[in-house]
Image (tube, grey):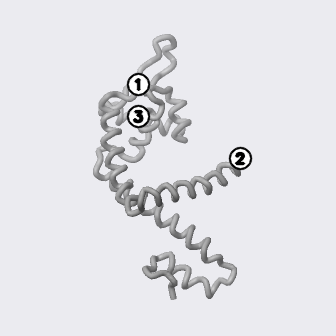
Amino acid sequence: MCPAKNPDDTDRHVALWSPELPWLNPLHEEISGRLISVMKHLDRARAEAHRDSALSRAQFRVLMGLRRLGAPYTAQPSQLAEYLGLSRGALSIRLGPLEDRGLIVRASDSDDRRKVHVTLTRAGHRAFDRHGVREGQNEAAVFDTLSTTEQRQLADLLRRLTLVFEERAP
């Protein structure tokens, strides 16, 4: 029997497994189960934004990488690939269609023709904003079920957990 008034899938999961697994910490299981569930819903909300957009998730990430740099929104491919966690070849495959659509330009460095710069265009800037607004609206539909105070509390608690992992990272 679930103790919650309105049990969710995690409550049912914990209720089924708690008698079977005496070593299971029900509270920890509730937290991790709900974090996983929320991430699945957020992933679906982001995927929905990509379905309604002319940008794939991979293309959006490239534009985001350039936008994050600030004006003039330019990077060398090696810098952009490193930021995105991609090989230069994988990045190059993503850049072609973005360039074809006028969302980025690739240009040789005026001082060293061996160097190439990737720059976000005005059209790329607008495409990023359109998509980002759509994605933000989908996320707001999830988080706005909580009050602003509850959202702040959740963000603060998740920061504390995140810092544990960041401090342990090599």
**Disc 3 target residue:** 95
Q: Which residue is mark 2?
A: 170
Q: Residues within 10 Å of mark 3 (few under 14, many from 20)?
A: many
Residue furthest toward the top? 111
Q: Are marks 3 and 2 in contact (CB under 8 Å)?
A: no
Query: Looking at this view, is 114 or 135 the one in front?
Result: 135
Residue type at numbered disc 3 = Leu
Does residue 142 sit above or below 60 in this rendering? below
Query: Quick check: marks 3 and 1 in contact, CB under 8 Å?
Result: yes
Tag in front: 3 or 2: 2
Mark earlier in primary sequence (1, 2): 1
Q: Real-space Cα distance between discs 1 and 2?
A: 35 Å
Secondary structure of residue under mark 3: helix
Q: Amino acid at mark 1?
A: Arg
Q: Quadrant of residue 78?
A: top right
Residue that numbered label 1 is attached to:
106
* Mark 2 residue type: Pro
Which residue is located at x 50 percent, y 36 percent? Answer: 89
